[in-house]
Amino acid sequence: MEIVVMRTMPGSTSFNTVRLPTTIPVRFQIAPGTGPNLGIANADYTVGLEGDPPLAQGKTDATGQVPVLLAAFWVGTPVIEILGTRYEVHLHPELAAIKTLAGVQKRLDALGYMTGYQLVPIGDAEPADGMDGARTQQAILNFQTDHDLPMTGVLSNETLSAIDEAFKGKGKKSHG
């Protein structure tokens, strides 16, 4: 099922149609990386808005995914409760350029490679820590390993391009 959004320009006689999914998958995993066996399968979850009854509940699928209703973002901030922890779900904000450390960290974080956000209190708006430390280096190495790149820990042009492509959904799949 999809949501169809129609719009027209002033003075136009034709419509532009955008098809949006009704849900956005959110994946919970046990370790960084993109391997297919990293998802937390069969975990009970609820999805709702703060203070309201759950909109959905169930068990994560085999890959650890939870479907979040897209419409929920229009009326509030969806909250997922899983494994005794509550997580606010936000649509991805505008990213810093890929050639900046913040841009690389946010892309790696979104791809499942932890760069330091776990050191920041839950709820902080900036998940990346902004430091080129050991966790960022390990995230880069993990990404390079999963994408058959030279394991240097260095953000070469090849690695930056691969991170950007993977973030846009065009990258190689993990060998898991």
Image (cartoon, rainbow, N blue to C red):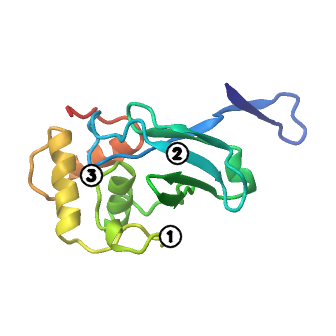
Residue at the spot 60% in from the left edge and 48% down from the top edge = 47
The residue sitting at the top extreme is: 1
> Is the Cβ of the residue at disc 2 closer than 8 Å to that at disc 3?
no
Hey, what amino acid is under mark 2?
Tyr
Secondary structure under tag 3 reads helix
- At x 20%, y 39%, the residue is 147
- Place of residue 165 in the rendered image (x, y in percent of width and height, measured from the top left): 35, 41
Q: Quadrant of residue 98?
A: bottom left
Compared across the picture, whether 43 is left or right of 79 comes to left
Residue, disc 3: 160
In the rendered image, the vertical position of residue 125 relative to residue 99, given as above or below:
below
Residue identifier under label 2: 45
Q: Position of residue 159 (x, y in %)?
A: 22, 49
The kind of secondary structure element at disc 2 is strand
Q: Which residue is mark 1?
A: 123
Q: Earlier in the sequence, mark 2 or mark 1?
A: 2
Count neighbours of disc 3 (C-alpha within 10 A) and say few if under 14, some if 14 to 19, many if 20 or more: some
Judge whether 84 appears above or below 38 on screen: below
